[in-house]
Image: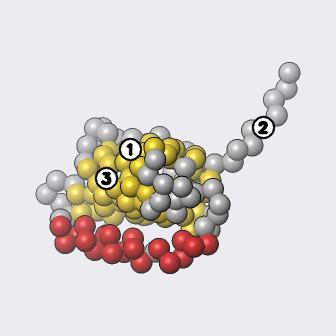
Amino acid sequence: MNRVLKAFLATAALLLPSAAYADEYGLPGEWQQVSSNAGECSSCKITIMRHGSVLTIAANNGWSAAVQADSPSNTLWAVGNGRWQEGKGGPYSGTLFNIAIILKGEQLQMMMLSETGNRRAGTIKAVFKRQSAETPLTKM
């Protein structure tokens, strides 16, 4: 796993130069999944909250993570660790994972590396867009 983790972090580091074009809002907020190599999920969302240079990520499909941000203010990328809840995530249920997230333009890109028991490590790659702050008008 150590060699796989190093390769994972090296890949995440390669994404950094393009982060200079990220939008001014940084990573915190609500994000809607638009694609994933683990299968499409139009209802999958994550919420990222800032706690200084540490960010917490909570997903509505059963995983959460704590990541260290690149800066305490306008964060463009972060790396850390997380865990899938028991009974969630199919083959990833209950597993620990390493995660890297990076803001590229208006998209949040995520790479999650998880070890699933006796099997090889699995990599989940997903892309998210910022959840719209607008709410539909309701009839009175």
Q: Earlier in the sequence, mark 3 or mark 1?
A: 1
Q: Quadrant of residue 120?
A: bottom left
The amino acid beneath tag 3 is Asn
In the image, which disc is placed on residue 81? Answer: 3
Identify the residue at image location x=48%, y=54%.
Answer: 72
Identify the residue at image location x=51%, y=51%.
Answer: 41
The amino acid beneath tag 2 is Pro
Q: Nearer the viewer, residue 82 or 136?
A: 82
Q: Earlier in the sequence, mark 2 or mark 1?
A: 1
Vertical order, 34 against 12 (above or below)? above
Q: Distance from label 2 to label 3 (Cα)?
A: 36 Å
Q: Quadrant of the C terminus?
A: top right
Q: Does residue 115 appear left or right of residue 26 in this picture?
A: left
In the image, which disc is placed on residue 116? Answer: none
Q: Residue furthest top?
A: 140
The amino acid beneath tag 1 is Ser
Question: Total marks drawn?
Answer: 3
Residue 34 visible within the image: no
Q: Distance from label 2 to label 1 (Cα)?
A: 29 Å
Q: Does residue 118 appear left or right of residue 100 in this picture?
A: left
The residue beneath circle 1 is: 64
For the residue labelled by badge 3, is the local secondary structure a helix, a strand or a loop?
strand
Instruction: Choose mark 2 or mark 3, whichever is in front.
Output: 3
The residue beneath circle 2 is: 136
Verify CB contact (< 8 Å) between mark 3 and mark 1. Answer: no
